[in-house]
Amino acid sequence: MPFVRFKLFNLDRGAIVAAGVIAAVVAAAFLWPSVQTAGPPGRPGGADGRPVPVIAAVVTRKDVPIYLDALGTVQAYNTVTVRPRVDGELVEVLFKEGQDVRAGDVLAQIDPRTYRAQYEQAQAARDKNAAQLEAARRDLARYVSLGDRVTGQSVDTQRALVRQLEAALRSDEAAISNARTMLGYTVIASPIDGRAGMRLVDRGNIVRAADATGLVTLTQIQPISIIFTLPQQNLPAIADRLREGARLPVLAVQPDSRAVIETGELELIDNQIDQATGTIKLKAVMANAERRLWPGGFVSVRLLLDTRQGGLVIPAAAVQRGPQGPYVFVVGPDHTVDMRPVTVSTIEAGQALIESGVEEGETVVAEGVAKLAQGSRVATGGDSKGGNGRGKGGTP
């Protein structure tokens, strides 16, 4: 029985050794083609050892606009809540809701009868005092002409009466002016060009000067304002441009499609920085001729700060991000790539403005960077110019 166990143990160990040899042969068979086709050290290609196909672009010079982007709020250029300035019954409403009005257009009428009576009363008081003043002046002239036959006291008394009536007459003129003004307030006119909102008081109601709601709110939407904020770091550059006398264009664009809604100019910079957010508030004014902007709406704002003349431009897709910052793959004469760090000034319309890292005329990889590493061999298409061209494939 012990002899039988020994034979079985030897048989199992032999089977294991045989299986290991077979596995090694199979692995060698699979690995041998890869070893045969692998590229030379330091110049890796694709997974099969061949050059990586990429699309390249040539570094060129172009004029590049430099924009500052922000989110803005549309505001009416002027907003006025029309309120009555005298008390009385609202007898007429002469505007329609949503109507465009001009400065001076009559919007409403308050019952003027009480104020007309006060005006006429003030006129009557003035006429009365004017008549008394005329008589007093004649008496004074008579006393003076009598000379010594009239006492000096009588002359002085009459002269004082004349001055008193002259003062009363001036007071009457002021009362007439006040009454005329109050009577004029019964006609409510528009102080600005604008668009009428919803009517807040109906005809027949008693309105008072102390009412807080008013009759209607007018908003001026042509032109119109956009308020937006930018980081305080942008303030020196903007202020320098304004000191140079530049008129900085501002674009209102759709947040989703980036389509331009309206164009205008920067009107002012606020006089202080918001310490809570570290931003500065700015105001742009736009003609809004087609009324595509409406008060209270939100738009994306683009402030054209400057235009870089002859800047180095490459496709934005060519710029990669790494732990050390942005970089690009520059294609050398031997069709290997150099992983080179760059400084990006701005990206606009799919193009990156490069401050340093590449030179005009060099070729960079615009598409196909996923399989690249330092020293990779590439197969570029027909090199394109203009910073955003695409090749058609091919091998070097």
Image (tube, grey):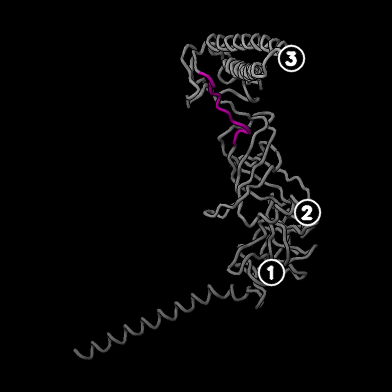
Residue 2: x %, y % from top left = 20, 90
Mark sitting on residue 147: 3
Which mark sits nearer the N-terminus, 1 or 3? Answer: 3
In this rendering, the answer to whether 272 lies above or below 377 is above
Q: Which residue is pictured at 66% across the width and 41% down the height?
A: 284
Task: Tell me the mark number nearer the camera, choosing from 1 and 3.
Answer: 3
Q: Nearer the viewer, residue 343 or 130?
A: 130
Residue 262: x %, y % from top left = 68, 36
Mark sitting on residue 386: 2
Quarter of the figure with residue 51 = bottom right
Secondary-structure class at tag 2 = loop
Label 3 is placed on what type of residue?
Gly
Q: Nearer the viewer, residue 249 or 142?
A: 142
Q: Which residue is pictured at 63% across the width and 46% down the height?
A: 282
Which mark sits nearer the N-terminus, 2 or 3? Answer: 3
Secondary-structure class at tag 3 = helix
In this rendering, the answer to whether 142 lies above or below 319 is above
Quadrant in the picture for the C terminus: bottom right
Which mark sits nearer the N-terminus, 1 or 2? Answer: 1
Q: Do residues under tags 1 and 3 come within 8 Å of each other at their CB atoms?
A: no
Mark sitting on residue 258: none
Q: Can you identify the residue that label 1 sits on? A: 340
Q: Which residues are magenta?
A: 75-86
Can residue 105 be seen? no
Task: Look at the image and say whether residue 166 sits in the magenta stretch.
Answer: no
Task: Tell me the mark number nearer the camera, choosing from 2 and 3.
Answer: 3
Classed neighbour count for the residue bearing mark 3: other residues with Cα under 10 Å, few (<14), some (14–19), many (≥20): few
